Amino acid sequence: MKPPAAPKSTTSFGAVLRHASIYSIGPIGVRIGGLLLVPLYTYNLTPAEYGIMEYLDLFAVCVTMFFSFGLSSAIYRFYYAAEDEVGRRVVVATTFLSTLAVFGSVAIIMLLLAPWIAVRFFHDPIFQRYLTILFIGFTFNAVAELGMTFVSVLQKSKVHATIKISRFLVDVALNVWFLIGLRWGVQGLLLSNMISNIGVGLLVYFLFVRPMGFSFSWNILTRMVRYGLPMAVVQLSLFIINFSDRFFLQAYSDFTQVGIYALAYKFGIMMNTLVVSNFFQIWQAKMFEVAEADDAKEFYGRVFTYLIYGLFAAGLVLAVLSGDLIRLMAPPKYGGAAGLVPLVVLAYLLHGVGTYFELGHRLKDRTKILGVILVATCVVCVGLYAILIPRWGMLGAVLATDIAFLMRAVWVYIAGRRILPLQFEFRRALLVAAVTAAAMAVRLLLPPLPLPLSIASGVAILGIYGAVMIAFVLRPAERDALRNVVRRVLPSRAPRGV
């Protein structure tokens, strides 16, 4: 099979938006579908069981990040830095073989340690069965993630979205069968995840990784690890900031609190899925691709402004409507999740801004600074967890996360100015933030309403917000571009033949 070719370079923001929009089809579809399936989980799992699933998922992610060495970040840089097709094949093959060797070894070790881990960390022997299922599919998941990263490197957004949606549909079928048909609870959900990991891992290997061959270069691997290891530290630190609060919650309360908190994050993390992750899925490749263009700096500044528009608009939608959605989809015992969602959304908005400020560090190969900043932020965040969670529980956890992401964004920006000075439109960003905050304040000041009236008032607030943004915030050229997009998306009202 002929290996795929590298994409052509362009500094068109439309190209970034087009690919990011296509990438978003899969994750957005999956997240929306996942929200629609919330009643399946909340009415068939207790908050404690929901918390156990969250705990196990995070445990697997933590192990994965620890042993990733940042290769998934490095492949973007080294694939485009390769001089020819042969060099690109070596980069992909070296990354794959290293990943397979490392994660295969880790999976075997974790399976052998499962009885000890179950007793030492989870204090219940039944977790041995859960951990066994979890780590059987561990290596396949690593291969799947690497393959999907390679699809993103090639900017094959349609393929990426198709695989995401297909996997979700398989997961839904398996979850319904195991959870409702067989009533296997947590064990059934773990089995479903294992089966889908195996399927996707094999699929992306045969379609995208295997055609690149099996060449290996210690020199390239060493350079990739040297570049990617600081990014691995960044990712591990982000994980601790994002998710170690669950471990504190479990330690100071129980799995029930973890389950309610996890439901709040299921809605709030849509901010990451709708905008942040999908944008950076294509941006990680695009920012290197256009780096040598004459208008690169201007392009980077313009993209930041449009990212701000998207972050605040998506964040407001989620913050305004999530409470009503939770009332619709979960029984009252999960009700505590609704008030936390706006603060979770804010955390991921700050995360998106901070990640964009990493631009100069990545372009100039100064990723070690990002590692130092994230480690410092992580230490502060864990300290805040230790102080705030025992006092305020779930509210303390999300407030600590907000503060940590804000600190990280400020530190990364200050350090980035010294590496690659870029002009960002902060006044416009503050204006967008003020308009969004005003709309959210109106929502919070409304008294408790019956569900239909509450939904209607939320939709009205969003409509007024959109009108204000278009009339007073967007520039004339931006309004014209928005009209053109709407005209292309909406069907024409003119009769045929006119």
Image: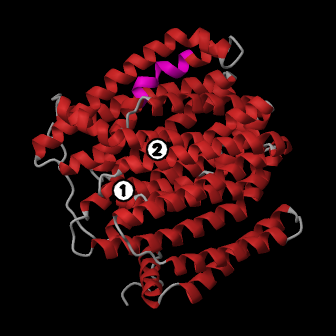
Q: Is residue 195 above or below residue 351?
A: above
Give the residue drawn at x 57%, y 37%.
Answer: 172
Residue placed under numbered mark 2 in the picture: 234
Label 2: few (<14), some (14–19) or many (≥20) C-alpha neighbours in 10 Å = many
Give the residue drawn at x 58%, y 28%.
Answer: 59
Q: Is residue 20 left or right of residue 407?
A: left
**Rendered-image quadrant of the N terminus:** top left
Of 350 and 233, the residue lying toward us: 233
Q: Is residue 179 left or right of residue 301?
A: right
| Callout 1–callout 2 Cβ contact below 8 Å | no
Q: Amino acid at mark 1?
A: His
Q: Secondary structure at mark 1?
A: helix
> Is residue 135 magenta-colored?
yes
Residue 407 sits in quarter: bottom right
Q: Secondary structure at mark 2?
A: helix
- What's the magenta region? 132-141
The percent position of residue 352, horizontal first and vertical second, equals 51, 59
Q: Is residue 215 left or right of residue 373?
A: left
Of 123 and 331, the residue lying toward us: 123
Give the residue drawn at x 52%, y 72%.
Answer: 309
The percent position of residue 320, horizontal first and vertical second, equals 72, 65
Q: Residue furthest front?
A: 418
Residue placed under numbered mark 1 in the picture: 361
Q: Please report whichever mark, 1 or 2, sits nearer to the chain's N-terminal start.
A: 2
Identify the main secondary structure in magenta. helix
Q: Give the spatial CA distance, label 1 vs label 2.
A: 12 Å
Give the residue drawn at x 74%, y 36%.
Answer: 249
> Is residue 77 magenta-colored?
no
Of 378 and 120, the residue lying toward us: 378
Looking at the image, how many numbered discs can be counted on the residues? 2
The percent position of residue 414, horizontal first and vertical second, equals 47, 64
Residue 145, can we see it? yes
